[in-house]
Structures are given as C-alpha cells and as structure tokens.
Amino acid sequence: MTTRPPLEVADVFRQHAATYLMTHKASPRQRKVMRAVMACRTAALGGHVEQCDACSHQAISYNSCRNRHCPKCQGPARARWLDARAGELLPVPYFHVVFTLPGVLAPLALQNPVTIYNLLFRAVAATLLEVASRRLRSQVGFLTVLHTWGQNLLHHPHVHCIVPGGGLAPGNAAWVAGRSNFFLPVRVLSRVFRGKFIDGLKMAAEQGELRFHGQLAPLAEPAALERLLDESVRNEWVVYAKPPFGGPLQVLKYLSRYTHRIAISNRRLLAMQDGKVTFSWKDYARDGRRGTMTLEAAEFIRRFLLHVLPRAFVRIRYYGLMANRRRAKNLARCRQLLKEMAEAPDIAEQEHGEVRAIAFPPCPRCKRGHMHWLGDLDQRFAREFLISAGGLDTS
C-alpha cells in the first residue's frame, strides 16, 4: 500500500521494550501504548480487504491500533478531524500563539498530569479571553492543542492556539477586526498567563490536588513549593506569536501539522544499531538548525513514554466563540456580519481532495484512485475467494 519507513518506533519497541521494562518503571497506560504500537498493522489485530475506487484493485491490509500515541495512526484521524473543521473557518486572518510552561515547573506535570495540564489550558484560555476583551473590546474564539515534547523528545509542555484576528462585539452586534499584522501584545499575554497559572497552582496545592514523589517530595512542604514558585516568576514566561496566516485555506493546512502530531514520527528515525537509536531533530536554540541525535534505546523509549497522556484526556479544546455548545450559532453570526456566508462550503470543497488523500491511501496499481475498506478478513472464505478472483495482492 503506502511505502513503509525503513525504521519505525514499533521496531524499537519490539527489539528493546523487554529489556527496558526490566530496568525501568512503566505505568499500565505506558505499557498499553507500547503493546498497541507494536501490534499496529500486524496480523495480531486482524486485517481487512481494501479496494481501489478507480480500477477495483484489491489488497489485504492489517488493521490499525488507533491509539493516539501511535505514529502510524495519526494520518486518517487528522484527515477526519480536518474534514469536520473545514466548514468552521472564517474569512479573516488567523494567528498562531504558543504558551510555554517554564522548565522549572514542568516536572510537576509528570507527577500530576491531569491537574497541571488542565490548569495550563485554563490559564491560557483565560489569558486570551481577558486580554482580547480589554484590547479589542470583543469576545474572541480559538482552538488550543497541548504538546508535551520538544524536538529532542524531552518534556516541554506548551499549548498552541489558533486564533481568528477579531471577535464579536458585546451583544454580537458587530464584528471587531484586529490589526492585520498584529494580534495582541506578547509581553502582556506572558505576564497575565504567568499570574493566572501561579494563582491556579497555589489553589490546587491548598486544595490537596497535587502529589509529590521521589525528587519532588520536598515540595509537599508549603514553604518549599513557595520557593519554587518564586523562582519560576523571576523571568518572563515564554509566549510566542507567529505572523498571521494568508487565509482560511492556509490555516487548514497549518492545523494538520499540529492537531494530531505525536512526540516523534517514524520518518524522523534514521538508524537503530548497537543498542542505540538515531533520529533527526531541529535545534530551536540554534535558529532551528537541523541535526541528528543518537540515544541509547532505553533512553529513547523513556523519552517517548514521557508523552503518554492520561486516559481520555482531551488535548484539543475550544474556547470563547468556538466553545462546543455555542460554536455553530456564533460562527453563523460571524459569517453573517462578515458577509461571507458562502466561504466555508467553498473551503471544504477545495480541500476535499487533500483531506481525502490523507484519509485513504493511493492505489499502488493505478496511482489514480484511493483504497477503501471492502470487508473484514474474519470470513474464512475471504482470502481464497479474493485469490481465486485474481485481484488480491498478498505481498
């Protein structure tokens, strides 16, 4: 079907996971992720028959694990999500804003992921809504995505926000447009974000929502935690605003790079030999220079597992005008005010081909059509029938 990368995360797990688990602790959730990644698109999960919608070529494919941490399962999930989002974009400039949790506080998230990551979302959302209300005199809406990694796979929690350049005036009476090349002042965002997160963290500690183990055990003492918070506010917190996009179509393509990304993709893996894994990465401390990094396999696995999220944790969230309960009504009002009612369907139609190409792999025979699910292989006669029909690719 599609070309398999020469090396996959699953290969690293198959060769080194057993040794890793003898020397490292792994939660039941992390073990489940490893099992899923290793089983993905193998006979262990069964298979199905796919057929080309152009030339009727048929082929057997093994089923996907559909785990959100699996490098091989994100393309179809991303395509379905993008297809649903295409009609929600507005014909206005969009901005990309990134809020980063300081490194001194990041270890708290490893031991309290639900509490800290939820607090991170709340602080980011409250910051954007408050500052936009003061500066733009309007209510904005935005999408947020949690990433927990850097290019070197180390723990680096940050939230990506995709924000339309404007919002609804009080009473939804008018669309208030922001400046075309500037959204909100970054320094203001940084300081408001810092204050809201620290306040929320102190409240969580007072209410007994934080747990401290191992090297963080001393933080169970209020005075020690207070010293850590004092240290965290000595420097500006990193908030980065990227230049505006060209338009809704560019936003849709850009979103596909962030919403369903995982810690590392298979295409970044370069080699595995002598118990070590080599992969490509960008060093953003050196202006994004590309290079390679080699880690012991156990360290590579450890870093990958740092980014396994708690069960059912929602990592893509919407706020303000785009909050789930009011999104359709608010966006319809925005389009009415912008006098662009026909824009969203056009976007969905123009992007259909690209989204479809991600969701359905191309036909390996005719190169024109796409392979679609035809039936499961759980029927005993399926394989023999397809082979006798002369259309089954068993390679």
Image (cartoon, rainbow, N blue to C red):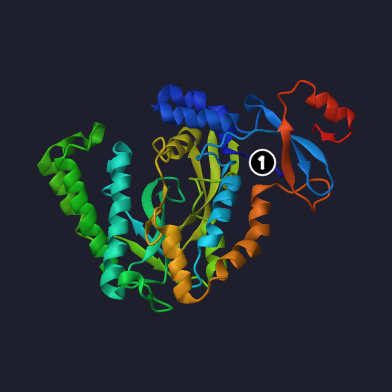
Say above or below: 33 vs 203: above
Relative image position of residue 170 (x, y in whole percent): 30, 71
For image coordinates 83% across by 34% down, the residue present is: 392
In the image: residue 211, left or right of residue 347: left
* Circle 1 SS class: loop
* Count of marks overlaid on the render: 1
Q: Is residue 81 visible?
A: yes
Displayed quadrant of residue 8: top right
> 214 or 298, which is in the foreground?
214
Say above or below: 249 vs 315: below
Q: For the N terminus, give its image quadrant.
A: top right
In the image: residue 256, left or right of residue 180: right
Which residue is under mark 1?
6
Looking at numbered disc 1 in the image, what kind of residue is underneath it? Pro
Q: Residue furthest left?
A: 223
Relative image position of residue 164 (x, y in whole percent): 43, 68
In the image: residue 21, left or right of residue 355: left
For image coordinates 65% across by 29% down, the residue present is: 42
In the image: residue 9, left or right of residue 141: right
> 91 or 61, which is in the foreground?
91
Displayed quadrant of residue 82: bottom right
Displayed quadrant of residue 387: top right
Relative image position of residue 206 (x, y in whole percent): 14, 41
Say above or below: 301 vs 196: above
Say few, some or many: other residues with alpha carbon within 10 Å of mark 1 (under 14 / 14 to 19 / 20 or more). few
Relative image position of residue 330 (x, y in whole percent): 41, 63
For image coordinates 68% across by 53% down, the residue present is: 357
Q: Is residue 236 visible?
A: no
For image coordinates 26% across by 69% down, the residue present is: 188
Q: For the C terminus, give its image quadrant.
A: top right
Say above or below: 365 vs 177: above
